[in-house]
Image (tube, rainbow, N blue to C red):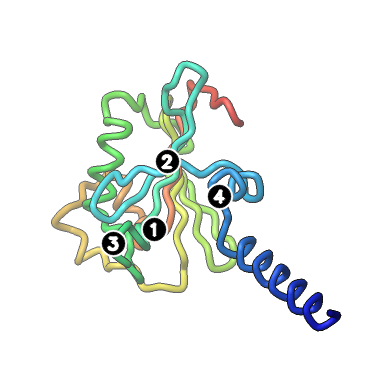
Amino acid sequence: MRNKLVFVVAILMNCFLISTAFGQTASELEGKYGKPIMAYPVSENIWMTPEFTEDGQICYARLYPKRISFDTNYLGNEMQLWELKDVLDQLAPPPTRGKKTNFFGGSFLLGQLAETRFWYDKVTFTFLSSLKKASPTKKELEPTLKADDIFSDPFVPGTDIVIVSWRDRKCVNR
């Protein structure tokens, strides 16, 4: 009788362990890790995670290279300047940015990271770049650059993350 009881308890324990390992629901995951983050595929190789104002306008966005999609891995992918420029021009078209401020194009070096900001009256672009990887040379970029273009900054090529923040909009969660 004791052997049967041990066997039944072992079976029940095994079933309990299997059901907790494989039975996680969306609500259980959300309870454990929080709500999923909304991400948009804004180009072939770039994701965007936005934040919004109370009335639904975008006020803050992070752009970063796709590393994975539903059916594809993009390991080692970097944001290409031409693709990034197109995305930024769609998100904050040049005529809507306002004038460049007096502090336009400041860079901060933080160990192996460069943080470069471009301030306009209505929007700020922050480029975060790793200094460990080689950036394209100016000669490689010349065909696509203008002298006053933000992409001519030496720290912008090889960017890992771009943050776009609208200065005249208040985000709900900030």
Q: Residue at x 32, y 31 (%)?
A: 92
Q: Is residue 97 left or right of residue 173?
A: left
Query: Is the residue marked by circle 2 packed among few (<14), some (14-19), or many (20+) residues within 10 Å?
Result: many
Helix, strand or loop under label 2: strand
Q: Which mark is residue 159?
A: 1
Q: Residue furthest front?
A: 1
Provide the residue designation for mark 3: 71
- Disc 4 or disc 2, which is closer to the eye? 4
Along the line of sight, the residue nearer the viewer: 44 or 36: 36
- Disc 1 or disc 3, which is closer to the eye? 3
Provide the residue designation for mark 4: 25
Q: Residue furthest right?
A: 2
Q: Residue at x 28, y 64 (%)?
A: 72
- Disc 3 or disc 4, which is closer to the eye? 4
Q: Earlier in the sequence, mark 1 or mark 3?
A: 3
Cα separation, mark 4 vs mark 2, equals: 38 Å
Q: Earlier in the sequence, mark 2 or mark 1?
A: 2
- Disc 4 or disc 1, which is closer to the eye? 4
- Disc 3 or disc 2, which is closer to the eye? 3
Query: Is the residue marked by circle 4 packed among few (<14), some (14-19), or many (20+) residues within 10 Å?
Result: few
Type of amino acid at the residue the image marks with label 2: Phe
Type of amino acid at the residue the image marks with label 3: Asp
Q: Residue furthest bottom?
A: 3
Helix, strand or loop under label 3: loop
Q: Residue 42: percent from the left, percent from the top?
A: 29, 44
Along the line of sight, the residue nearer the viewer: 81 or 174: 174
Cα separation, mark 1 vs mark 3, equals: 25 Å
Snapshot quadrant of residue 1: bottom right
Cα separation, mark 3 vs mark 4, equals: 22 Å
Provide the residue designation for mark 2: 125
Q: Residue at x 21, y 52 (%)?
A: 82
